Image (cartoon, rainbow, N blue to C red):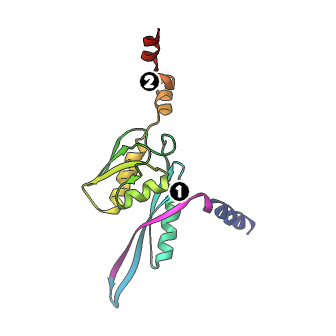
Amino acid sequence: MARDDNRRGRDRDEAPEFQDRLVAINRVSKTVKGGKRFGFAALVVVGDQKGRVGFGKGKAKEVPEAIRKATEQAKRQMIRVPLREGRTLHHDVNGRHGAGKVVMRTAPQGTGIIAGGPMRAVFEMLGVQDVVAKSIGTQNPYNMIRATIDGLSKEASPRNVAQRRGKKVSDILPKTDAAPAAKEEA
């Protein structure tokens, strides 16, 4: 019993860390001998707004139970995405899942989140403040979110690229125009 109380305490400590957004709720029915049985499917995006995001889906007879299941699944399968200056993507990236294709582009400060529906929820929970995104193909929220997560998982920071190549970050990034200015003065 003590172990169960400890687990509940840990869940309470975890709760404020993550925020969740209900993206879609779908009523599904099963026809049985006596009539129809209704159930609910929920799609939830969870994130810490500091570079971690995940999505989950849950099914149950009641809406709150479906949302709870979806939230738990989303917390279990979170991914970390490197962000530039904590506000935008490092580079433009495409994501794909089934018929869902998404294009995500980095944006200058003050642009805001220019994205539709389910993609907006992912970016808000991720903590991105400036991004331009377009969904091409499907409008199914499940496939749009999967395509968005697929694209975000391909995102790489200069630090990751430098580490993978065995170089310094300064070797990876493009040179600034400070060097030509120094030559002109001399």
Which residue is drawn at the image coordinates 50% and 74% (left, top)?
65
Q: Outermost residue toward the top?
A: 186
The residue labelled by disc 2 is: 176
* Residue 77, x across and y down, in percent: 49, 54
| Along the line of sight, the residue nearer the viewer: 7 or 118 | 118
Which stretch is magenta? 16-30
Which residue is drawn at the image coordinates 34% and 62% (left, top)?
141
Q: Is residue 151 above or below residue 77?
A: above
Q: Main secondary structure of the magenta part?
A: strand
Q: Earlier in the sequence, mark 1 or mark 2?
A: 1
* Residue 82, x across and y down, in percent: 49, 42
Which residue is drawn at the image coordinates 66% and 64% (left, top)?
12
Alpha carbons under labels 1 and 2: distance apart: 41 Å
Q: Is residue 127 left or right of residue 24?
A: right
Q: Is residue 60 above or below residue 70?
A: below
Packing grade of label 1 (10 A; few <14, some 14-19, many >=20) is: few
Which residue is drawn at the image coordinates 47% and 79% (left, top)?
62
* Label placed on residue 76: 1
Is residue 27 rendered magenta in the image?
yes
SS of the residue under disc 2: loop
Q: Is residue 118 left or right of residue 21?
A: left
* Residue 119, x across and y down, in percent: 38, 56
* Label placed on residue 28: none
| Along the line of sight, the residue nearer the viewer: 79 or 91 | 91
* Residue 148, x across and y down, in percent: 37, 51
Q: Outermost residue toward the right?
A: 2
Q: Amino acid at mark 1?
A: Arg
Q: Is residue 159 left or right of residue 101?
A: right
